[in-house]
Image (cartoon, grey):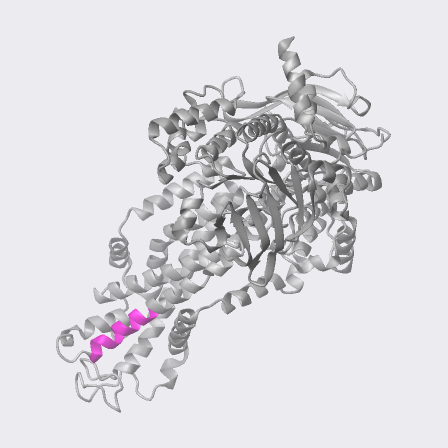
Amino acid sequence: MTNSTHAARPDWPTLRRWRQRLVHFGLTGWLGLSIVFFWVVAAIFGPSLLSHSGDAYGGAVFAPISAAHWLGTDYLGRDMLSRVIEGARYTVGVAFVATLLASGSGTLLALLAAATGRWTDSVLSRVLDTLTAIPSKMFALLMVASFGSSVPMLIFAAAIIYLPGAYRIARSLAININALDYVTVARTRGEGTAYVMLHEILPNITGPMLADFGLRFVYVVLLLASLSFLGLGVQPPEADWGSLVRENIEVLADVGAAVIAPSIAIASLTIAVNLVIDNLPGRAARERGGR
Amino acid sequence: MGSLVVVDKLTVRAGDATLVNALSFTIRPGEVLALIGESGSGKTTTALALMGHVRRGCEISDGSVRIGDKDVLSLGARQLRALRGRTVSYIAQSAAASFDPSRSIMDQVVEPTRIHGTMSRAKAEAKAVQLFRELALPNPDTIGQRYPHQVSGGQLQRLMAAMALITDPDLVILDEPTTALDVTTQIEVLRAFRRVVREHRATAVYVSHDLAVVAQMADHILVLRNGQAQEVNTTAGILTQPSHAYTRSLLAAARPAPHLAEQVEKGTLLLDVIELSAGYGAIDTQGQPASKILEDISFKLYKGQAIGVIGESGSGKTTLARAIAGLIAPCNGHILFKNRELKPEVHQRSKEELRRIQIVFQMADTALNPSQSIERILARPLQFYKGLKGPALQKRIHELLDLVQLPRSVAQRLPGGLSGGQKQRVNLARALAADPDLILCDEVTSALDTVVGAAVLELIGELRRELGVSYLFISHDLHTVKSVCDEIIVMQHGRKLDQVAHADFDRGPHHPYYELLAASVPELRQGWLDERDAADQAVLAA
């Protein structure tokens, strides 16, 4: 019975609002969006489009940039372009899933805390505050040391580390919305907690939560890169961008292409995501009275 | 005698929209001109333009403003700074938002003299104390040492007037200075303002939407609508011989309405509140909350009846509505609905009980979810209580929109795209969607303009006649309550002081507090405030 009208037909105002958001994108926003789009395409389709395979050995070690190897070769003579593009799958994929988990569950818990209040709120807040007290790299180290390094493990660790931050932000937004009259009206109508959480509060905090999602994504990328750099992340022969930097760190002083390429990849992704975020909720939207 | 202020063809634009359109008027020294109109009519924009200021996104595209020998619109930033607070000063609607909470009142009141270097600190303070005295502030010698949160809203508004007057400006702009105040406070503030304006022979622009208030203050009235002057005349002229149709509609909306509520036959007993007490904060050992808001409230509401609850802010009237709606658990007493006891909290009540009592809030802005379309807002109670769907649901939504006199085209819009009056109608329609027996109206017209508010009140009266809904109508405005209700409950400090039946509205004797409230509502004629003053003097003398 719930939302039969709503589900039967898309919610036009929401769509319209999204279109407006895109229209308000500035030049930097489009630049960021295209870089992100490039890396997403690289992660999904890249490996099947490459002529070289990333694990093909042979050839010169640390070869410079050439027509055959656009980004040179690494310490085992593998094509660097293929390595970076294959690494995108790990970096972008793992970071995306981990951030989605962290932001999603953080927001849900926050909505629950705001809508229920009292002891649920207190318990959730204190437990998650405690988690914040543990340094992120230390926690990741601990997890990897206890359970070994695997992709699901990395996703899980990153999600737990970034969950409390997302929870804090979502809760502070949700508490404000929860005090507004339309939520009170829904309560006096007799609506359940789930309805209040998902239909009354959630749509009004998505703007800032998406901005937070982007920011958190960048943190996760950097965490994964630094873990891989320490040799705790994705294990060889597979490599994400962090481990590519570590593998080839010895040529930092002279040639560089092999170590600079993955570094630029990390930098371009993080900067691009930030450019998109800056343009996302937009001052224009806030001036129109949106949040 | 020449004019002090000459405004010629002033035009203010925001993008494509024209906020003020070729407005011209003059003010002679010592005169008070009132700008009156509904919200969005450009009255505040005009007032700000007199200081050479426009809000962000607006620009003065044409015209001139001359104050004394200064052409305000041609001044540079530095000259404008020298003008503001010295030649022209401004008193804003919300004094609470205009004072810096971290500095003492005296510091802020004498600040204009310091900025403009007009007099020494000691002299400025002496002058401030003199102004405090003239504005009838309590303890004029020491009130300056307090901080803004230590004085009441009405006092803060008068302190702001002192701040505006300390530099002896040529022109004072008062922007809705009493709109946010209770009636009994408003009368004090009005009285103080009028006295200083008269004594200082100040030239003033008084911006307001309330004709009755303006009638006490102004020499001339300029009626604005959509940025255009509709009519300019002396106050007496506007009140007695309005020439423009819009002025007449404003006057009609401001006059005490002929009591819309004809006596409705009392039906069965609907709501019976028995010795209700409620409050906030920690519960002590006797089961009493730390701060008690309501004490021993009892009344009966019959089907088809509309009961008004009146009192100043803080009198507990909103808490009463919240207790009945189940948002605050009462600590004592009972609420019987159709002779069955209502559970104290919302989640303990049955869906059917919840459906029968609906609440409509004051601020239509926050009462509608900004991310849901009007259609969705109205559809939810219909789906929730009645399980309507498909064409039946669509039909009912259209019926509801017709009922509250909104065009069906608003259904697809978001609340942000509606005006204040339209939002309040949607708010009512949502309550009606549940097909309730009782609607709790919490200050539903307080945030609306006079004309729009009057239309909403008329709608409320009509719905009552057509659908037989009962109302508990909460307001701080006696005039509003009188026009819709057939019984009035007077509340102060959480207690019920008096209950007045329809026939006795204008016929005493009543509780003195009711008399005070009744006497504090400004009447739409000149000289009303003088008569009140004279009457009070007589009481004091006796």
Residue lying at the far bottom in this picture: please name it.
A67
Q: Nearer the viewer, residue B3 or B167?
A: B3
- Residue A237: quadrant of the picture: bottom left
- Residue B300: quadrant of the picture: top right
Looking at the rendered image, the quarter that the N terminus of chain B falls into is top right
> In the image, is residue A30 above or below residue B23?
below
Looking at the rendered image, the quarter that the C terminus of chain B falls into is top right
Task: Look at the magenta stretch and give its main secondary structure.
Answer: helix
Start and end of the magenta stretch?
A257-269
Q: Give the residue drawn at x 44%, y 30%.
A: B148
x and y percentages locating residue A229 in the rendered image: 22, 66
Q: Nearer the viewer, residue B7 or A31?
A: B7
Residue lying at the far right in this picture: please name it.
B265
Q: Give the residue drawn at x 30%, y 82%.
A: A82
Side of A272 where A189 appears, left or right: right
Tell me, yes or no, whether the highlighted magenta stretch contains residue A261: yes
Q: Nearer the viewer, residue B257 or B493?
A: B257
